[in-house]
Image: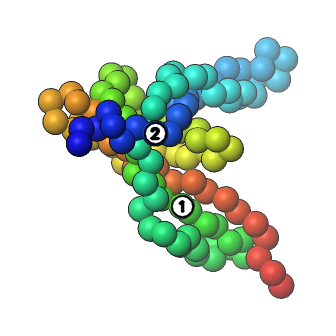
Amino acid sequence: MGLASKLRTRIRIERKSVSHDADYGTEQINWVEVATVWAEVQDVLPSRSERLADSIIIANRPARIRIRYLAGITADMRVIIGDRVLHIVSGPAEIGRREGIELIVEQYSSEGAAP
């Protein structure tokens, strides 16, 4: 079974666009769509891994994403799947001879720790 038959999830890939406020000179960050493509998405671990950092619980949900080959994808981009925002932490790695690419992504969420 080839890669194309496993692409069942629609994802959006975005890149960061930074501009400066004309009045105050502060950075304004916007995310611009690069592509919307079909992907194979697999959670790396079935459960969340959590760590305690400065009294805030940080949960990361790593996942592996495979898509058809798409030039120009870089590690400073992000992936949107439904309401999940995922940051690219590894890749893109080429699969075969430009058959596809693989990304390792993580979703970060934080919530205040219980006292």
Q: How many marks?
A: 2
Q: Is 46 rendered above or below residue 102?
A: below
- Among the two numbered marks 2 and 1 on one chain, the one whose residue lies closer to the N terminus: 2
| Residue at image location 83% in from the left, 84% down from the top | 115
Q: Is 70 rendered above or below residue 105?
A: above
Percent position of residue 15, x then y: 54, 28
Q: CA distance from mark 2 to mark 1?
A: 20 Å
Percent position of residue 81, x then y: 58, 41
Snapshot quadrant of residue 32: top right
Q: Nearer the viewer, residue 24 or 50?
A: 50
| Residue at image location 84% in from the left, 17% down from the top | 23
Q: Nearer the viewer, residue 96 or 32?
A: 96
- Left/right placement of residue 31 relative to residue 76 reads right
Q: Which mark is residue 8?
A: 2
Task: Tell me which colouring the rendered structure shows.
Answer: rainbow
Percent position of residue 12, x then y: 55, 31
